[in-house]
Amino acid sequence: MTTTVAPDSERDVKRSPKKTVSDRTSAENRLGIKLVAPAVVLMLLVTAWPMIQALYLSLFRYRLTAPDDREFIGIDNYVTVLSDSLFWRDTWNTLLIMVVTVAVELVIGFAFAMVMHRIVFARGVMRTSILIPYGIITVVSAFAWQFAFSLNNGFVNSWFNWLPWIAEDTNWFGDHWPAMFAIMVSEIWKTTPFMALLLLAGLAQVSEDMLEAAKVDGATWWQRLWKVILPNMRAAIMVAVLFRALDAYRIFDNIFVMTRGAQDTESISFLTYRQVIEQMQLGLGSALSVILFLSVLLLAWLIVKLFKVDLAQARGEG
Amino acid sequence: MRGKTTIGTWIGFIMIMLWCLFPVAWILSLSFKSEGETATGSAQFLPKDPTFDNYSAILDNGDFTRALINSFGISLIATVLSVILATLAAYAIARLEFKGKRFVLSLALAIAMFPVVALVGPLFDMWTTFGLFNTWPGLIIPYMSFTLPLAIWTLSAFFREIPWEMEQAAQVDGATTWQAFRKVIVPLAAPGVFTAAILTFFFAWNEFVLAISLTSTTSSRTVPAQMSFFVGPDPFNPPYAQLATASVIVTLPVIVIVLLFQRKIVAGLTSGAVKG
């Protein structure tokens, strides 16, 4: 790929300047490993090592408040978790939020991407605006929407009371479905722009010539969308779905701020947090962590297999 | 497709602007409502009697300003360190052939999808043992690991586009190795590094799960965590206006960064997902 290993920064000057190495490939190999080592070690230190720790702790009955009572109980924690209806309800909530938000975001995000692709004026203004929800803190988004839906201080009830199911005194956080709706609104609002930008990049790769040719051949707008545009940006769509789905599966901030898990709106991440931090059940919490980790792996694998996502592209190997 | 402004595009444009800016306008408007107004219930969008009281109150709130300092400090340090490590790694990935390149890229991808909550328990345990619980490094270290993947992707996509031959060309023209690096490579690589830094900063600024789990006092609690605990005595009647004010203040840096660097951020966000 390259010809010389040129010194690229102060750090390298001391070791790499063109010593005529007998075996250049092995030198390049060593330098490459040295350069990635700090990043790899740090990434493993904070993820792989604690995960192994969690795997070990999950085999004990272990409460931080009573560290001396630690007792080896094998897979009992896993049995407790998997036979608990709370765990399954939270998993269902999480999956529901994931499927609904990603589906809605995909549709709205695609519409936004089409508009951004076509527009000839105010591109900078639009790019700036669309990055604001992306950059805003999730906690802020959660507060903004919690207040918007609030019974006393929100505008939603007074603005939308012409809808049959909304009245002046609709308490959005007093029931399961309205609360889930409010949580999803906040999640969708914040993350649709990210989806739109990924899809916009995909749209830019669809060849104009092909579209022109389809038009000349008499394809309608709808046919062009389904037969030319969408198939040609498949890769971008799949990568966007993969990233957003796994991100939505980890939903935590919105639920923590908006309901604290009340009205059965708890997600699987929230359950894990509550076990570990609030109840100090490190053993049981670790079992939940391991299950959560495995379920994310399974989900990623399923999405990659089902939709045939090109991971090389996701990794940025062009 | 490009170049035609139809009525549909216009409607789309207005929809996007409303979508993006309306909730921001809402918290801005709420931040100007007086405490009395929100306490009695104020369902209208605009404040009856706009006031700056919330801003002076929140900036006088020692806990909030302390959290703001923590947020800035932790995010900036994590960003700088993460970008330095990512630059080294991305340089190797983009330019060198070495064993384990695929491993590094796959690891980065896996970590980007990692459920952060799963780490809360073990990290809590480890950090209390090492004395890192409730300290700046206790947050900086995990923030670095979780931003490294994004930074590495973004940077290696940028670095692949750099015409590295120019460095040799400069040396042939009589530049020293250092000059060739400083005058040719640095200016070409800087935009990518900068973009990675912005995305990393956004992540650290936004992070919430670890911020509430690995801190216990205002000595290291960041703004998102502080805000979630700032609910006041009555959980069913939170201090709406003050929380909205805090939201506006913590959103300002985001808006400034976005206004200045929108083009770079978009380039960085999409570089990992679509061939860079």
Image: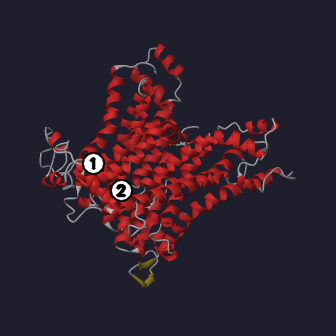
Residue A276: in sight, yes or no?
Answer: yes
Q: Are marks 2 and 1 in contact (CB under 8 Å)?
A: no
Q: Are marks 2 and 1 on the same chain?
A: yes
Residue A46 place in picture, x, y as percent: 54, 64
Mark 2: which amino acid?
Asp
Chain bearing mark 1: A
Q: In which quadrant of the rendered view does residue A191 lie?
A: top left
Chain of the residue that carries numbered disc 2 in the rendered image: A
Residue A295 lies in quadrant: bottom left
Residue B216 in the image, given as x and y percentages of width and height:
39, 70
Q: Earlier in the sequence, mark 2 or mark 1?
A: 1
Looking at the rendered image, the quarter that the N terminus of chain A falls into is: top right
**Of residues B85 and A244, which is closer to you in this image?**
B85
Disc marking residue A145: 1
Q: Can I make out residue A98 in this image?
A: no
Side (left or right) of B202 relative to A186? right
- Give me the C-alpha separation between circle 2 and circle 1: 13 Å
| Towards the viewer: A8 or B128 | A8
Residue A161 in the image: x percent, y percent? 14, 41
Q: Residues within 10 Å of mark 1 (few under 14, many from 20)?
A: many
Q: Amino acid at mark 1?
A: Trp
Find numbered disc 1 in the image and state the secondary structure of the residue it sits on.
helix
- Please give the name of the residue rendered at 23% of the width and 57% of the height, measured from the top-left corner: B239
Instruction: Pinpoint residue B211: horizontal percent, then vertical percent.
Output: 41, 62
Task: Kindly identify which numbered label has been placed on residue A253.
Answer: 2
At x 38%, y 58%, the residue is B223
Q: What is the secondary structure assignment of the residue under circle 2?
A: helix
